[in-house]
Amino acid sequence: MGIKEDITVALYGSTKMVLKEYVDNITVNFGEVTIATSQTRPIIVKGCASLITLIGELKGKVLVDLPLETALKISSIMNDEELTEFNDTVSMTINELANMIVGNAINKLVDAGINVDISIPSFIFGKEIALYSSEASDILVVPVETSYGNIFITISIASK
Amino acid sequence: MELIKHDPENLFMGTKRDGKKLTCMVVDDVPFMVKTLSKLLEKFGIEVVQTAANGVEAVEKYKTLKGRLDLITCDITMPEMDGLQVLEKVMQFDRTQRVVMISALGSKEKVKTAMQLGAKYFIVKPFKAEDVFRILSFVITKF
Ligand SMILES: [Mg+2]
């Protein structure tokens, strides 16, 4: 298996584990992964997105993106308070969710001997925001279907 | 320190010899994480006497509390100053201070680095209540 498959599989496991730990009774299923290789194709943000940069042997980005409605529902449960509109609590919660998902996926890779670290998450709020990469990347979009709505995990790995 | 009560069945950490609760400062930049962990610690019978949302704040608050904290739980990924830097600063004041790192980044290498810097243990997020209890009990009784 290549490194792209390794990180994708690791992200499947960590996404399920983190969501199940913090969101009671959530169901988590994975939809069909779409793959594209392009220098020009941007990643499109759907709502509340946390962007984490992969540093080291594995260079790239992981975007954990939730439509606002889903972000509000999940953040409300995680904070044990009703959040009806976007605010700092929502952005911090989604950033931490992404940090745990990507962090736990990375742990497995590092223990397997791959030298990779992650950045502090950056938060992006808005619809149809296009993120362009300056280098050619392989882009994988993993739809995560949950009982609170879909989450989209985009993995962009720099192709050498 | 010796514990006079220890009842793992009820996940109660016990009190100090003088009958007082163990004290802790929780350091994490994310409010829900501070909330979750504080609730858990209170359940264990540990009093959360202080919280800090970043490394700089943590070190400042530590300076005013040092000597009076039985425990510090410290997140690693934080803005301003990260948890490992906080750990280093705390160790400069008191090598015996019990600091437990809590992070989503829990590769063997990260854990090793933290332990070498003086952390007494390492908890990977997300965590289970029983694991946190087991680790903190160990740290409290061993160090
Ligand atoms: Mg953090």
Image (cartoon, coloured by chain):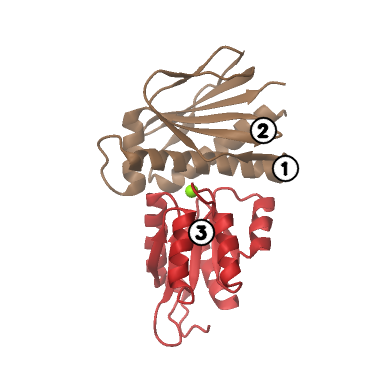
Three-letter code for the amino acid on which mark 1 is drawn: Ala
Q: Secondary structure at mark 2?
A: helix
Q: Position of residue A33 (x, y in %)?
A: 55, 22
Badge number at residue A99: none
Pointer 3 with pointer 1, Cβ within 8 A: no
- Chain under disc 2: A
Q: Nearer the viewer, residue A85 or A105?
A: A85
Colour chosen for chain B: red
What residue did someone put label 3 on? B74
Cα–Cα span, label 3 and label 1 = 26 Å
Determine the residue positioned at 69% across, 51% down: B109
What residue did someone put label 2 on? A6
A34 sits left or right of B61 in the view: right
Instruction: Quadrant for the C terminus of chain A, please.
Output: top right
> From where the camera sits, is residue B114 visible?
yes
Determine the residue positioned at 65% across, 62% down: B117
What residue did someone put label 1 on? A112
Determine the residue positioned at 43% across, 73% down: B23
Pointer 1 with pointer 2, Cβ within 8 A: yes
